[in-house]
Image: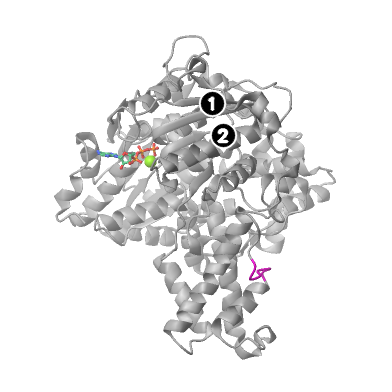
Amino acid sequence: VPETPDAVLDGLDPEQREVAQALHGPVCVLAGAGTGKTRAITHRIAYGVRSGILQPATVLAVTFTNRAAGEMRGRLRQLGATGVQARTFHSAALRQLQYFWPKAVGGELPRLLERKVQLVAEAAVRCQLRLDRNELRDVTSEIEWAKVTQTVPADYPAAVAKTQRDVPRDPAELSQIYSMYEQLKRDRSVIDFEDVLLLTVGILQDRHDIADHVRTQYQHFVVDEYQDVSPLQQRLLDLWVGDRDNLCVVGDASQTIYSFTGATPDHLLNFRTRHPGATVVKLVRDYRSTPQVVRLANGLLSQAHGKAADHRLELVSQRERGPEPVYAEYPDEPTEAEGTARRVRDLIAAGVPAGEIAVLYRVNSQSEVYEQALADAGVPYQLRGAERFFERAEVREAGTALRGAARAGGNDSLLDGAEGLPSQVRAVLSTKGWTGRPPSGSGAVRDRWESLAALVRLAEDFEAAKPGATLSDLVRELDERAAAQHAPTVQGVTLASLHSAKGLEWDAVFLVGLNEGMMPIAYAKTDEQVEEERRLMYVGITRARVHLSLSWALSRSPGGRASRRPTRFLNGLRPGSGAAGPRSGAAGSGGIDRGPGRAAAADRTPAVERKHRGPARCRVCGRTLTDAGEMKLMRCEECPSDMDEALYGRLLDWRA
Ligand code: ATP
Ligand code: MG
């Protein structure tokens, strides 16, 4: 912990210091990836609190994911500033909504809707419209888009015409379904995720007394990743801030990757117009990545077009030179995964900690083959979103079951015959499908088993330390530990989608699946959509501190026709792709490592013969999946995707 408030400013460069010391009035930081935006705002809060200028309880820091919020709280603690609220928009809004609902509306806050797609399906049927599964999913996304852009059903067709969106059905029909869906929610007294923000906005708009209450509580606002704020989040922010204008935002227009949810960098780019007196700071020193990584990132952005690209800032690396990026071409996806796993293992052998390595892909369904390859190579890994023990879905579910059993106490036939505490825990966990025998292999199923086994061990240790402890005592202990986040952390290689890697960094990053169709993704058709894909790749590249690998596969499965091409985004940037660009890559074969090649690929075990690792389960709720579409997604259709981890983090809280 820095000894004095001024010591909090050590370790900031002059521009970052300017941000940290501008504690009043509007502040806007426009800067590229890795320039220390998140660091600057974290130190700003810590400096304000430590110097007594900011009351910690009056500061609300808004981040994009629960993980980012947790990291910020951790950093603030290290800097000697506690008591600041660091939350996602959803989590902050839900808290306020729960608190004010009885006063503003009466009764308890309605339940959060769990099976959204199902309700949309019902709405469609009532409108006498037949939709297949995929259409339903798309219609659901359209409704979400309409809500976050604050478009009511009646205005939806006009909004489609104005934005020239690709829509899954006739806009008039979509408007009908949307309207019916809203009606059904009201009838059943449930709310969806978007409602959490909409209702909070509604209450703050309507009830000046409540708005005043919130504004007395929070007086200083800080928003990270501001380029991805949706119109609805902006509206909420405006209501929170009121006319006090103590708002500090940081963002990078080149990292706008959530347009499909209605996010737009306009709020960031127009900040100065909306807040004429704003302190505007630009940061260009990149503290995260080596000159080689930064050069590739700059090269990629130099080919970008559109509004965000007009505001790009050339990054200047502050680090020593490191290895050149490695480009690797593979004959097929499983070979790409195996090659990646081998390189990961080599890096670990060379001393890079597993926790400092990430494999990033475009869509979650790509993870499976990497999970398998890493497991086969004996490399521990974790999927993004499953990091903290007590936040894991299975652990929370188990917690709920244990709490239920503790409440039922001696009346619960489940506990009949179970005498010591650990055997009671085993009995309760068996209702969740847990057995004492571990499933073979590793992967998500094994992880789930390990988590529950860790709970049993915890019960054993607890009983040894406190003989005679009851299930209720254990539940209390678990709650305390969860609150203190005393999580047994497993340090493994991170597997994550590019979207969920935003804001994070690793020593080594493997960007995989960089072939046309995946990057840009096949459904990106308009120029704007393609530009967003390029930004997504920019986000991926800039996650790497030192080692960066970029790979693609020429066909999907072994023996398949080599019909794929490497992503157009690397044209002119990777060796052997014509045009001038950074010369880099592994030695030999023109700078491109062609992987083990076709002959070797033919020797490998076909995918179908690979060992299975038990039933596929939803990675959000753990339910066994049988539907092929869901198995591909690796989650239930109605479980939210990790595109907004903030959302399902709250969903699980809610269920618990
Ligand atoms: P992104 O756009 O990806 O969110 P960012 O601009 O928020 O990136 P940070 O994550 O705050 O960047 O910082 C990137 C890395 O650089 C971090 O490891 C951070 O600790 C380090 N860093 C930032 N500023 C400095 C500095 N002045 N001196 C040393 N290291 C720094
Ligand atoms: Mg950041």
Nearest the viewer among 358 and 10 is: 358
Question: Which residue bears the numbered disc 1?
Answer: 328
Q: Distance between the residues labelled 2 and 1?
A: 9 Å
Q: In which quarter of the image is the C terminus?
A: bottom right
Nearest the viewer among 114 and 628 is: 628
**As displayed, is residue 181 above or below residue 288?**
below
Nearest the viewer among 412 and 598 is: 598
Is residue 651 visible to us here?
yes
The percent coordinates of residue 168 (x first, y second) are 73, 35
Q: What element carries label 2?
A: helix
Labels 2 and 1 touching (C-beta < 8 A): yes
Quarter-wise, where is residue 319 in the image? top left
Q: Quadrant of the N terminus?
A: bottom left
Dot 2 alpha-carbon crowd within 10 angstroms: few under 14, some 14 to 19, many 20 or more: many
Nearest the viewer among 470 and 49 is: 470
Is residue 395 visible to us here?
no
The answer as to whether callout 2 falls within 8 Å of ligand 1 is no
